[in-house]
Structures are given as structure tokens and as C-alpha cells.
Amino acid sequence: MATSAKVPEAMDGKKLRTRSPAYPFVNLETALRRAKEFYDEQQHHAAPIKVAVKLWGYEEKSSGGLQTAAALVSFGLLSDEGTGESRKVQLTQPAMRILLNPDAAAKEKAIKEAALAPKIHRQVWQKWGANPPEASMRFALLTEWEPRFNPNTVDTFIREYRDTIKFAKLSESDKLATEVKDNGDEGKSDTPYVPQIGDFVQWELNGVLQFKEPQRIRDISPDGKFAFVDGQFSGLHVEQLIREKAPENVPPPRVPPPLKQGMQEFVVPLSDGSRAVFQWPTSLSKEDVADLKDSLKIVERKIDRSLSEGEPKQ
């Protein structure tokens, strides 16, 4: 008696679904209106995501509201941090330049950069430019693109892309908009700056430079979103940092010796740029652990004593 073979899911009466690449839920013109609505209520302050979507007329957990926020993030108009109920959004420096900059030329340039900020926009722009032939574009997106577009959404994306390019007044002469600028314009390119420990940076907040002199990055948070610079205890958003040349006659940063094998280390950055470093062997006996705990109590007393005597010693 023959046994029935297991039917693959695609042949078992169930349709396989093609998931389109990520693209903005709204075009750039609409995204900028939403950014202006956010600014009118929140200015440069961060707000919970549920506050933002309500400003745009959506219900708190509406998919349309969340997709609108995602579109603004992809255009580089919003930054976000946290997840779920703790997620917050905030207007970015490029958004503030577009909304508030009185310089028409600078504003137009920022709009063009925002139009090509989404990854899918840059890819399509590099392939077809400002005036892609619609039929050829649709065919390629459905059959050649990786991942391929869903037939139910491909026309929505094409319309959003064309509307955004038209609004930004991009033309074939703007081909260099997606390329890194001349080397003489150090640290200022369309590729986001990725801070490194030891770099000198300027901190720009709401269009105003915050440091009298560039400061050196001493540490970076594990998620890469915050940098810690000399003279600042709190972390700074990396998107607000501009790379600068090192000031003259500044000694190179002291590079700590590599950690010996079999050792663990815990580093505490301090407000003046120095660090407190704790090291101990990976393998410890119970007696060693007890001795270390007693020693830490002595360290604690010494720290308290230094505070009572005035400023901590360097």
C-alpha cells in the first residue's frame, strides 16, 4: 500500500507571499509635513513614539502611524532609540536644517540628500537616475531585484519614488549626490560618520557648535549610539558629532597595554576623561574572592576619604 508523500507548503493550497524590500510609507513631501507637525509641538525635544503618531492623527498602535515614523527615520528626519513602550523619537539635525534654515540653497541641498537617504532610493537612483522608464523599472523590480518586489506593492513604491525625486528637484546633474565628497571636505559626506576612539569631534546641537575646541573621543557605548568625550561625563549622540582635525601640539592618547591572558577587566570612565580600571584573574579560589571583597572595602574607604579632603587626586 502506497503512503502519501508530504506536500510542500507552496503546493498544499497555501500561497507563498513575496515580501517587498523596505521603502518609505510616505513620500518626502509628506514626510516633511509630518516633521513640521512634530516640530510645532516638540521642537528639538524627544517624545515617546505614541505621542508622535497621535500628532499625525493616528491611533497609538496604528500601523500607519508606525510606518510613517519609520519613513521619517529612513529619510533621516527622525532618530529613534529604545523599543516598545520606551521607544522615543526626535528630529535630526538634517530635519532642523530643512525646517528652519533661511538659506534657500542649503535647504535645497538638504532636501536632495534626504530624498536619497533611504537605501532603496539610492539603489534605484544609481541604476536609473531621475527619470526611470516606468515599464522597465517595474519589470526589473519584479523579476531581477533582490529581494524582488511584491506585485501588489511595486506600483506604490514607484509612485512614492517618482514623487520624492520630483519634489526634491533632483536631476541627472545631481548624480554625485550619492557619492562621497572631495577629500578636502573631511568628515562631511553622505556616508554617516562612524566615530572611533581617539577621533577629535565637534558637537553640533540645534545648529550650534557646543565645544570651543574639538574634543577627543575616549569611549563609545556598546551599541555604537553614544560617544564619550574628554570633559563630558554623559554620552553624546553620534549623529550630532562632526569629525574635526586634531588641535596642534596635542599628545596622542595613551594606549593601555593589552590585557594579559587569563585576566578580566572592568573600566569606569570618569568625568574628567580619566578612567578607573579594575583587573583580576579569571580563575580565583574562594579565599582569593574573599580577599578581593575585603580589599574593595578598603578602596571604598579611601575614595570616601579623598572626597572629604576636597577634589579627588588625579
Image (spheres, rainbow, N blue to C red):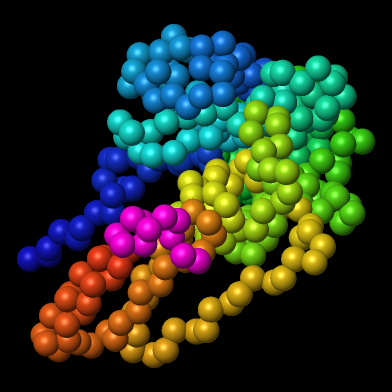
Q: In this view, does 121 lie to the left or right of 181?
A: left
Q: Considering depth in this image, is 306 or 72 the residue closer to the camera?
A: 306
Q: In this view, does 114 lie to the left or right of 282?
A: right
x and y, in percent, of residue 279 in the image: 35, 79
x and y, in percent, of residue 113 in the image: 75, 35
x and y, in percent, of residue 231 in the image: 57, 52
Asked if residue 59 is positioned above or below residue 296 in the image, the reply reads: above
- Residue 37's quadrant in the figure? top right
For image coordinates 89% across by 54% down, the residue present is 184
How many marks do you count on the picture? 0
Residue 148 visible in the shown view: no
x and y, in percent, of residue 134 in the image: 73, 30
Q: Considering depth in this image, is 96 or 245 the residue closer to the camera?
A: 245
State which region is magenta: 304-314
Report if residue 313 lies within the magenta region: yes
Asked if residue 280 is positioned above or below residue 4 in the image, the reply reads: below
Residue 61 visible in the shown view: yes
Report if residue 256 lies within the magenta region: no
Q: Considering depth in this image, is 204 or 53 the residue closer to the camera?
A: 204
For image coordinates 41% across by 13% down, the residue present is 54
